[in-house]
Amino acid sequence: DENGAALPILGGVKYTGRQGRWNVGVLDVSVDSTDSLPGRNLAVARATYDLGGESAVGLLATDGQPGAGDGASTLGLDLRLGDSRFFGPGHSGSLWAWGLDTHTAGEGGDGSAYGVEAQSRNSTWEVSGLAQRVEEEFDPALGFVRRTGVDRSRLETEYTWRSDDPEAWVRSWETRIAVDVERDLVGNEDSWA
């Protein structure tokens, strides 16, 4: 509830399964009323379709408002393209793009969050980057968000040295450099590391 107390669960149904290239999961729970909240139904569904290799497209939907309010929903879509030989033998790569949209009955809570991440790696080097935006009004009622009203970008590279000597005291050494920048939606730099 609004004070952080657990809601009494009356019952629920969970289904997970796989059929061909489809993976599906559904959770539907009915919670009892409390002194401050009426009883309600909370549901989450996730489906993914295997595109082959290490690639898939997925859909996420939630419905219900565990706290005060009449209702809330979230709808999301994601795409992951990956291959252990993306840039040739020994050079893997992946690209992940996602988007979520929330709607809350009443005022506020109608917002979006979206982003893209990419990575390339081999036995010596790894390079990755991400860019994401979480709008101010984004409010996943059956989930959480660390912070709203922010743009985040990150670039990271890592080098791994490995010894050919099996008797060496140091068998490998990793060096990493990363830049992580967060800004509010107006563009004011908020933090970077």
Image (cartoon, grey):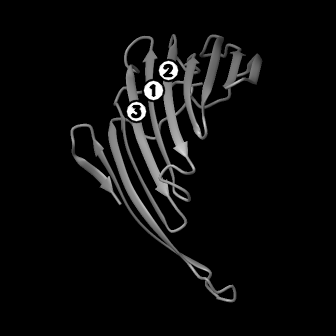
Badge 3 density bin: few <14, some 14–19, many ≥20, Cα 10 Å: some
User: Mark 2 or mark 1, which has the lower sequence index?
Assistant: 2
The amino acid type of the residue labelled 1 equals Leu
In this figure, which residue is indicated by the disc labeled 3? 114
Who is closer to the viewer here, 77 or 124?
124
**Rendered position, 97 above or below 90:** above
Q: Residue at x 55, y 51 (%)?
A: 85
**Rendered position, 87 above or below 7:** below
* Secondary structure category for the residue under label 3: strand
Q: Residue at x 50, y 49 (%)?
A: 86
Q: CA distance from mark 2 to mark 3?
A: 12 Å
Q: Is residue 6 left or right of residue 117?
A: right
Q: Are marks 2 and 1 in contact (CB under 8 Å)?
A: yes
The answer to which quarter of the image holds residue 164 is: bottom right
Who is closer to the viewer here, 124 or 23?
124
* Secondary structure category for the residue under label 1: strand
* Count of number-bearing discs: 3
User: Mark 2 or mark 3, which has the lower sequence index?
Assistant: 2
Q: CA distance from mark 1 to mark 3?
A: 6 Å
In this figure, which residue is indicated by the disc labeled 2? 75
Location of residue 154 in the rendering, given as x and y in whole percent from the top left corner: 37, 52
Badge 2 density bin: few <14, some 14–19, many ≥20, Cα 10 Å: some
In this figure, which residue is indicated by the disc labeled 1? 100
Q: Is residue 30 left or right of residue 135?
A: right
Who is closer to the viewer here, 9 or 128?
128
Q: CA distance from mark 2 to mark 1?
A: 6 Å
